Image: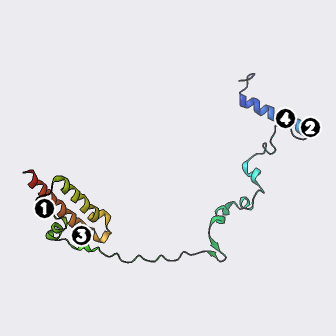
Amino acid sequence: MLFGQSIFQSVLERLKAEDETAEDGAESPAAHRVSGLGTGLAFDVMQGVSVASERVGEAYFDNLDLDAAGLTEKPEPVPDPEPVMPEHLTRTAPQEVAAELAISAADTPLTLSEKRRAFARANHPDGVALPFRDNATKRMMLANLLIDQALRRIGR
């Protein structure tokens, strides 16, 4: 507080006093004053700056891709071709999955976990198209069953 006023109030009074002296003297503005700073609102300052500022409701139309007749119509998207099921997803019999895994008596828990990860990488239902997820799920269930059985045999 300076002399019973806040800093803001004292600045406002100083600016008001400068404006009154500038009007009385009709001299050039002081060097520390910025021309146009005393204007009311932002739209007063921006008036006449650009053509877009005068078209308030049409400000975003400059950024749109329009043709002379009006809005351009987007072409219809080309439908994606029907997905084709990969060959390995057609093999859902337990014997076929067992042949792919090639589980042998020499497998260790480490090799079996590697086989499980490799099989899941190629056959996991989240990695295939939606129409083929049932087959992928069946294959993963069979592979997990076979690998779990082999792990139980090793543990005995």
Foreground mark, 1 or 4, reads 1
Residue that label 4 marks: 18
For marks 1 and 4 on the same chain, the one whose residue lies earlier in the sequence? 4
Q: Which disc, if any, is residue 55?
A: none
For marks 3 and 4 on the same chain, the one whose residue lies earlier in the sequence? 4
Q: CA distance from mark 1 to mark 4?
A: 97 Å
- Residue 34 placement, left or right of 58: right
For marks 3 and 1 on the same chain, the one whose residue lies earlier in the sequence? 1
How far from the left and from the top, in percent, is residue 98?
15, 66
Residue that label 1 marks: 104
Residue that label 3 marks: 135
Query: Tag 2: Cα neighbours inside 10 Å, few (<14), some, or many (≥20)?
Result: few
- Image point 73% across, 25% down: which residue? 5
Residue in front for this viewpoint, 42 or 115: 115
**Amino acid type at image mark 1:** Ser
What secondary structure is marked by label 3? Answer: helix
Query: Tag 3: Cα neighbours inside 10 Å, few (<14), some, or many (≥20)?
Result: many
- Residue 29 placement, left or right of 80: right
- Residue 3 placement, left or right of 149: right
Quarter occupied by residue 145: bottom left
How far from the left and from the top, in percent, is residue 62?
66, 65
